[in-house]
Image (spheres, rainbow, N blue to C red):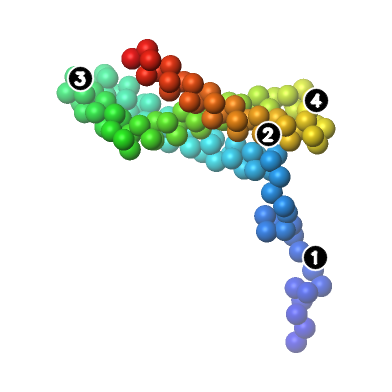
Amino acid sequence: MTNVTRSRPLSPHLQIYKPIPTMVMSIVHRITGGALYFGTILVAWWLIAAASGAAYYDWVSWLFGTLIGKLVLFGYTWALVHHMLGGLRHFAWDLGYGYEKHFATKMAKATIIGSVALTLLIWVVGYLVR
């Protein structure tokens, strides 16, 4: 019996390709898009709690104020900012800019650096205003 898979070409996959910044940012952009669904549920929960009365709102606010709650909200903030910057990068591509390999790599690196910096800035300003 002959092995028919030996004559077939291999499909490229993540174990074949060397990860490059643009590929990694594309994958992270998709993941953050999915994470935003979860975060939107949290925002809706908070709004429902605000409309439901003081006791329920206080409980939800307490939950979001715990260490785990703050970590989840920090992650949601980062996902939101990262997805926005990735969307701007894709918008530039839609306009026909940034296709050069070196520039695309710089934009991918700027996306991750910018998302972390903006998330930290948002949280620092939030705590200072509070």
**Residue 66 shown left or right of residue 125 in the figure:** left
State which quadrant residue 59 falls in: top left
Question: Regarding mark 2 in the picture, which secondary structure is present there?
Answer: helix
Q: Residue furthest top?
A: 129
Residue at mark 3 to residue at mark 1: CA–CA distance: 62 Å
The disc label shown at residue 96, or none: 4
Mark 4 packing: few (<14 Cα in 10 Å), some, or many (20+)? few
State if disc 4 and disc 3 touch (CB < 8 Å). Answer: no
Residue name at image x 39 percent, y 35 percent = 72
Residue 17 x, y percent position in the rendering: 73, 54
* Residue 60, image quadrant: top left
Task: Please state which amino acid type lies under the numbered disc 1.
Answer: Pro
For disc 3, the neighbor class at 10 Å (few under 14, some 14 to 19, many from 20) is few
Are there few (<14), some (14-19), or many (20+) residues within 10 Å of tag 2? many
- In terms of sequence position, does the residue under pointer 1 or pointer 2 come before the other? 1
* Residue carrying label 1: 9
Q: Residue at x 50, y 30 (%)?
A: 78
| CA distance separating discs 3 and 2 | 44 Å
Circle count: 4
| Residue 5 relative to residue 118: left or right | right
Seen from this angle, which residue lies furthest left?
55
Q: Secondary structure at mark 1?
A: loop
Rendered image: mark on residue 53? 3
The N terminus: image quadrant: bottom right
Question: Which numbered disc, 3 or 1, marks the residue that appears first in the sequence?
Answer: 1
> Alpha-carbon distance for marks 1 and 2?
31 Å
Which mark identifies residue 108?
Answer: 2
Please tell me which of labels 4 and 1 falls first in the chain: 1
